[in-house]
Image (cartoon, rainbow, N blue to C red):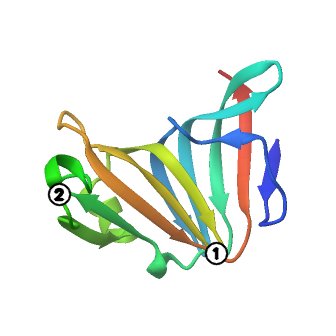
Amino acid sequence: MEYRKDRSTNVPFSLHDSRIQRINVTEDTLCLGMDRIFQYQDDGERTFEGSILFTRTDVEECSILIFDHPFGYDGVKEFSGKRISLEEFQEKYPKAEFEITTEGYHGYDTMFQGWLWNQENDPVFAILNIWNTGDMIYQVGETL
């Protein structure tokens, strides 16, 4: 099933605690392969397999901030880390997973904050910014 978040429709899904396991770009569509997508309703929580599509994405405007330390952690008062393009991220971190802890939707900018898990290394804090003028489509599959 598909559900569209088109800046005026609220969908009953959350990506909190979901992990982005793969990123694919075809033309101007960005596809995030998720380990799970959560749905919250009156009768509780359900978990689905699925993907998230961002249509009309300007990939050159998408980036990820990878922190040396989370802002405010042990007195850290400024950003310490690196900002890289989505393309560079895919090249340098092909097996990494991005665990979403906070999701934000602001106009044409979607922001996911969370933990970047890169194989056996300890996770680091990261922020993924996605710029798209189209829809955000939840492609929901089987219940997990």
Mark 2 burial class by Cα count in 10 Å: few <14, some 14-19, many 20+: few
Q: Is residue 3 above or below residue 29?
A: above
- Whether the residues at callouts 2 and 1 have beta carbons within 8 Å, the answer is no
Type of amino acid at the residue the image marks with label 2: Val
Q: Residue drawn at (43%, 61%), measured in percent from left and top?
A: 128
Q: Quadrant of the C terminus?
A: top right
Residue name at image x 36 percent, y 65 percent: 64
Which residue is disc 1 drawn over?
Answer: 108
Residue 139 drawn above or below residue 28: above
Q: Pick the residue in front: 10 or 92.
A: 10
Q: Amino acid at mark 1?
A: Tyr
In percent of width and height, residue 92 lies at 24, 59
In the image, residue 30 above or below residue 33? below
- Front tag of 2 and 1: 2
Q: CA distance from mark 2 to mark 1?
A: 30 Å
**Left or right: 123 with respect to 60?**
left
* Residue 20 placement (x, y as % from top left): 47, 45
Q: Which residue is mark 2?
A: 76
Nearest the camera: 60 or 122?
Answer: 122
* 120 on left or right of 22: left
Residue at horizontal 73 percent and vertical 39 percent from the top: 140
